Amino acid sequence: METKTKTKKKKGLKALAIIVAVVIVLGVLINVAGFYKSNPDKIKTYDTTNPYILEKTDISGHRSGGGIAPEETMMAFKNCAENDNFSIDVFEFDLHITSDDVLVLLHDDTLDRTSNSEEIFGEKDVRPENKTYEELRTLNMGAKFKNEQGEMPYADIANDEVPDDLKILRIEDVLDYLTSVGDYKFIIEIKNSDELGKKGVDILHQILLDKGLIDRVIFGTFHGEVSEYVDENYPDMTRSTGIIEVLKFWWAAITDSDSYEPPCKVLQIPYGKPFQYFGLNTATATVINYAHKHDMAIQYWTINDEDDMEYLISVGADCIMTDYPDVLYNVMNK
């Protein structure tokens, strides 16, 4: 009896060892696949009329260059548009709708992370759709900004001392400013979902029509119902892929599917850590060639590492979104 028990234990330990070994091997293979870099010579060229498929990579200021100035404020836009040390091609920013139907610039669902909303309104988790535009204009949108030295230079500014360059922005004001100082393209994401998101699309589309900017804007959303609403109601609006669409594309690319049908003209896709640790390598020659073969521009976010920037430029990324457009500019112009 004792011998049989020992035998069972040995078999159990052996099976466990095999399982552990398989897991380790799979982990190594996934990690290797995630960090694999293609030879740029393997990138192919395809005939296209897609205006977002480019010979030279576009520089996009993610959140208007939110790594070097308070994100999505006029201060940040001016820092990118009027800076003698670098230039950019595309401004990326996010929109929320207010309680009085104004589209304002904000990335998060609440105002806590970037502004002094808790101090001004006396409550946490303040959502823009619960406040009017004028109420939101009382905030300092640079209150929580930290520079590269870890300093918070605008933290103590409040109430009447807040300059216009640090107040919340309407999309109209941003577009009026940027079109007055340059010939920029735009990546604009509506953060609201469901009916608020659809209402936001209606307002945004009319603003873009009035300003003659439809053909210079890529619209984005993480909400499938909002993407469907755009496809059904505003076919003149170029949109990018949502999360599920990105995953479907990636699987089609790595399996070289013959049945894949692009949902739109622009693929906006993440690259770098932590995705690479899970084997999600979105910047191989296989992936990029598959995108361009299907007439989809391929744009990457949010790329703040210089080595990643250099690699993506070398393999023909159509656009790179970064919090540090000054760094990307320097990498491109070495």
Image (cartoon, rainbow, N blue to C red):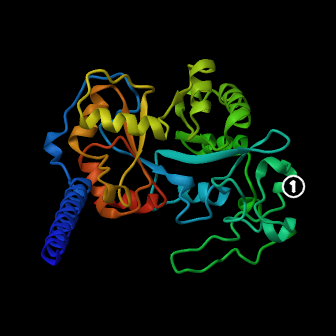
Mark 1 Cα shell of 10 Å, populated few (<14), some (14-19), many (≥20): some
Quadrant location, the N terminus:
bottom left
Q: State the residue in front, 19 or 245.
A: 19
Q: Is residue 206 left or right of residue 45?
A: right
Determine whether 243 is above or below 323 in the image. Answer: above
Residue 238 seen? yes
Q: Is residue 141 left or right of residue 239?
A: right
Mark 1: secondary structure: helix
Work out which residue is located at the far front of the displayed protein and give it: 1
Q: Provide residue 189's location: percent of width, then percent of height.
A: 59, 42
Q: State the residue in front, 86 or 160.
A: 160
Q: Provide residue 291's location: percent of width, then percent of height.
A: 31, 32
Q: Specify the amino acid type for callout 1.
A: Glu
Q: Provide residue 35's location: percent of width, then percent of height.
A: 24, 57
Q: Residue at x 27, y 39 (%)?
A: 287
Residue 162 seen? no
Residue assigned mark 1: 135
Determine whether 21 is above or below 105 in the image. Answer: below
Q: Residue at x 63, y 53 (%)?
A: 107
